[in-house]
Amino acid sequence: MLGAIAVIALLAFAGCGGGTVIDQAKTQEEVKASLERSQHAKIASVQCPSGVEVEAGATFTCKVSISGGKTETATLKIRDSDANLSLIDLSPNE
């Protein structure tokens, strides 16, 4: 489980539809690095959805694969219009 809430600073960019969306690749990289630091575990991969619009207060989930085959779900909250994120939950997949 999550020892402390992580704050992840990300860049957002304008999407095809004109709205601002989270940078999927950067989000995945930052979540992986943050979890490896906080959980002291090797993270194999993080898969976040594409096209997540930047809306303060909104949440979305990413699939986290931990080395050894275990998977968990990370819930992230968009903190502000600058696309700063907080990792608010990490739950094992059953």
Image: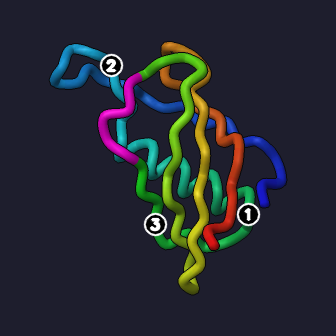
Which of disc 3 and disc 2 is earlier in sequence? 2
Q: Amino acid at mark 3?
A: Ser
The spot of residue 29 in percent (x, y) is: 45, 51
**Marker disc for residue 39:** 1
Instruction: Please tell me whether mark 3 sits on a helix, a strand or a loop.
Output: strand
Q: Are marks 3 and 1 in contact (CB under 8 Å)?
A: no
In the displayed structure, would residue 90 be above or below residue 15? below
* Mark 3 burial class by Cα count in 10 Å: few <14, some 14-19, many 20+: some
Identify the disc placed on residue 20. 2
Task: Kindly identify the residue that appears in the image at 45 percent across and 43 percent down.
Answer: 27
Q: Secondary structure at mark 2?
A: strand
**Image marks 2 and 3: residues in contact by CB distance under 8 Å:** no
The residue pinned by badge 3 equals: 45
The x and y percentages for residue 20 are 33, 19
Q: Is residue 40 magenta?
A: no
In the displayed structure, would residue 4 be above or below residue 77?
below
| Mark found first going from the N terminus, 2 or 1 | 2
Q: Position of residue 48 (x, y in %)?
A: 42, 49
Looking at the image, which is closer to me, 30 or 51?
Answer: 51
Q: Amino acid at mark 2?
A: Thr
Which callout, 2 or 1, points to the residue nearer the camera? 2
Tell me where residue 68 sits by quadrant. Answer: bottom right
Give percent across and percent down for residue 73.
59, 58
Which of the 4 image quadrants contains residue 56? top right
Q: Main secondary structure of the magenta part?
A: loop
Magenta-highlighted residues: 49-53
Rounded to the nearest angstrom, the CA distance separating label 2 from label 3 is 25 Å
Residue located farthest toward the right when viewing the structure as drawn: 3
Task: Please tell me which of labels 3 and 1 falls first in the chain.
Answer: 1
